[in-house]
Image: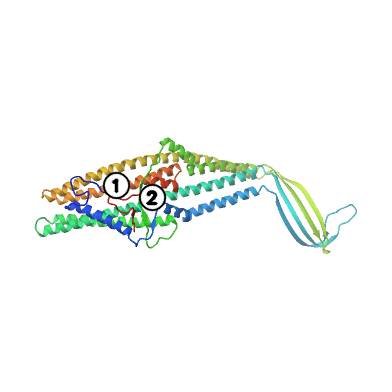
Amino acid sequence: MNTRPCVPGTGQGNGQGTGPGAGLWRHLWTALALAAAAQASPAQTTALSLPEAIQQALAQNPQQLSQRLEIDRAGAARQAARAAKSPALDAGASATRYGYPTFVHGIREAGVFPPLDNTVVDLGLALKLPLYTGGRLAQGVVLADLGQQIARERERLGAQELTFNVSSVYFKIQQLDALAQVYAARIASLEAQLQRATLLRDAGKTGKLDPLRITTLLTKARHDRLQIENRGREAWTLLYQLAGVPRPAQAPALTRYVAAWAPDGSLEQLRQQAQAQRPELQIAQRQSSAGLAREEIARGEQRPTASLVSGLHERSGSSARFYGDWSVGVQLSMPLFDGGLRRARVDEAATARRQAELAAQQTQLEVDKQVEDAWNAHAEAGSRLRVTATGIAEAGEALAIETLKLEHGVGLVSDVLSAETALLGAQADRLQAQFDLITTRFGLLRATGALSLERVVTLVAPDTGTPDGKSTVERNKP
């Protein structure tokens, strides 16, 4: 990430100036060089690329693993719904002691009295096959199928959100690290200026106000760098939290990337892609269909049910002689009166189905707005990046001018300090704009429902190094 401006006619662009402003550039690039050297040192043994970070999170994040288990659970519910339409065969056995002798089996022929006994043993098989259930079993299968589809879409949604969050935190760490290096260079420059101003004050060539001003700026710069370092540590912790693994004692290196490609297509085309791909829309549509299935199940409870039942039994008394018997028939159940319970359930299901339809419409509106917002944010990020390039050049030129004026005795230290502060702000804006450009591209793909590890790889490319030949991998340690 190169934030160094070229200032024509001065030593600012190559760090060869001699004034207070040159100190800022010299210390900045010294810090970057030391970071690159540390990156290339043998002590650093591991590096973490963006695809590796995303893969690790997708494989180990507990919430993502739970969503995959939800797919398995929905699959088991789907199998259960289909099995409910199949015949049920049960085996049973009983031994009963009666107070008075009872028939061991039924009458088999006229004039032959069946045996009596106080103890009866019954072994049998029972078969039940649903013939008509008012559509409840069929709708139960539909509902279970929709449940599994919803679980898959939620898992896909979770994967996209996790991919976006990991990518954003990954680049945020690099942004904060680069910003901390800028502030480190600022602090080093202020320390050098404070030493110079103190010598001039002791020599009677300047007043007490200049050292006081520099001291104030130095204190604030140190505080700002501390805040940036703390935010960097928090970002590292969040990255490992998303990855679902404990934070290691030694942070790995992060591969440096640059923006490589922007999602193409018009706003209307992106809206159409979102219609077909957004997991939230797929979930909302299936929830609406599930509401209709639940309503049909509730209506089915008002209809009669019929089942085929059959049994095969072997019964015996104390003599241990078994007598076979069998039965087959049809059971019919007709709801007559329940105090309005079934009717109320139908009304409840119909209301829930209507709510699901309205929720789907609301989701549609939200998705359209999110696509438009992501489109605008991406355009703004690109424009802001171009503006910051001009801002850094102007701030660098102003610093060079104020430095030359001070060296020739016609400038003020306060003007140099103000110019350095403006340059620092321009550099911070540049780093933020570079971060926003990449993250808004991620957000654009997320808004269309197309964000994945494969698409992230197409959005960025490994940095080929700075113009000074620095390492393509930047060491980022909290």
Q: Is residue 371 left or right of residue 145?
A: left
Categorize mark 1 by other alpha carbons within 10 Å: few (<14), some (14-19), many (20+).
Answer: many
Instruction: Label 2: state its secondary structure.
Output: helix
Q: Residue 169 carries which label?
A: none
Q: Residue at x 32, y 48 (%)?
A: 432
Q: Which of marks 2 and 1 precedes in the sequence?
A: 2
Q: In this view, does 313 lie to the left or right of 35?
A: right
Asked whether the viewer can see residue 478, the reply is no
Asked whether the viewer can see residue 433, the reply is yes
Q: Residue at x 42, y 40 (%)?
A: 371
Q: Is residue 111 left or right of residue 249?
A: right
Query: Which quadrant of the structure image shows residue 299?
Result: top right
Seen in the picture, residue 42 relative to 393 is either above or below; the reply is below
Q: Where's residue 112, x and y in %?
A: 89, 55
Closest to the observer, 305 or 311: 311
Q: Which residue is drawn at 38% across and 50% down?
A: 168
Closest to the observer, 262 or 384: 262
Closest to the observer, 462 or 203: 462
Q: Where's residue 384, x and y in %?
A: 31, 42
Q: Where's residue 320, x and y in %?
A: 82, 63
Identify the residue under disc 1: 430
Seen in the picture, residue 245 relative to 433 is either above or below; the reply is below
How many discs mark residues in the rendered view? 2
Identify the residue under disc 2: 168
Instruction: Label 1: state its secondary structure.
Output: helix
**Amino acid at pointer 2:** Ser
Q: Where's residue 63, x and y in %?
A: 48, 54
**Amino acid at pointer 1:** Arg
